[in-house]
Amino acid sequence: MLALKHQAFLAEMQRRGQAQPDGLAQCFQLLSLAAAIDQDCAQRLAPLGLSEGRFVLLFLLQGAEAPLSPHQLAERAGVTRATVSGLLDGLERDGLLERHVDPGDKRRINVRLTTAGEALALSLFDQHTQWIRDLFADLDQAERTLLSGMLCRIWARTDAGRAA
């Protein structure tokens, strides 16, 4: 289940006569799993002309009570304004969203889904969440709770976790 780069790292440790520190193989398993999930996600979205970033914007817009500005979308998606602009350009070209000048502030642009974008966002979100549920289907509730707790403990030891 380890990616080749992680297998190579462990093999190099062995070649150098270093014992495997506790947790290294598990870290590599986790990284390999995350990469596999990302790859599967990309392969599921690609036939629809979507990336994960475009998909995130679709469901953020679909779930919004009112049209959102590109700035608000960037904040909610956790990406830069430049990244959002590129994603919005592609979604607009594909007829999935529209940009409109805010009637209350002509300097502001609002973004909303087209009917096609709304339909795609609804169906795709349901498909995507079911796919994720299926990944964890072999784990019972106690196992999922245990896994979640362990992942949180590991997260807390990362730089990002300590900063949070």
Image (spheres, helix red, strand yellow):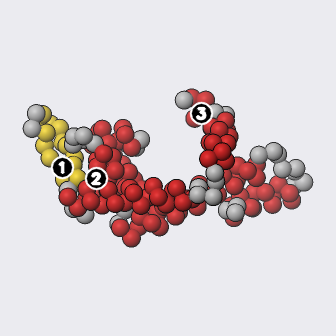
Residue under the point 82% across and 54% down: 13
Percent x, y for residue 109? 18, 42
Q: Is residue 147 visible to the viewer in this orientation of the structure?
A: no
Percent x, y for residue 63? 30, 45
- Which residue matches tag 1? 99
Depth check: give the residue in front, 7 or 149. Answer: 149
For mark 2, does the 10 Å Cα neighbourhood hold few (<14), some (14 to 19), or many (20 or more) residues?
many
Q: Secondary structure at mark 2?
A: helix
Name the residue furthest bottom. 47
Residue under the point 69% across and 55% down: 29
Specify whether 156 is left or right of 123. right
Mark 1 or mark 2: name the one nearer the start of the chain: 2
Q: Amino acid at mark 1?
A: Arg
Specify whether 119 is left or right of 50. left
Q: Secondary structure at mark 3?
A: helix
The label on residue 161 is: 3
Labels 1 & 2 near each other (Cβ < 8 A) = yes
Percent x, y for residue 38? 52, 58
Name the residue furthest right. 17
Q: CA separation, marks 2 and 3?
A: 30 Å
Mark 2 or mark 3: name the one nearer the start of the chain: 2
Q: Amino acid at mark 2?
A: Leu
- Which residue matches tag 2? 88
Q: Nearer the viewer, mark 2 or mark 3?
A: 3
Q: Amino acid at mark 3?
A: Gly
Specify whether 114 is left or right of 35. left
Mark 3 or mark 1: name the one nearer the start of the chain: 1
The label on residue 55 is: none
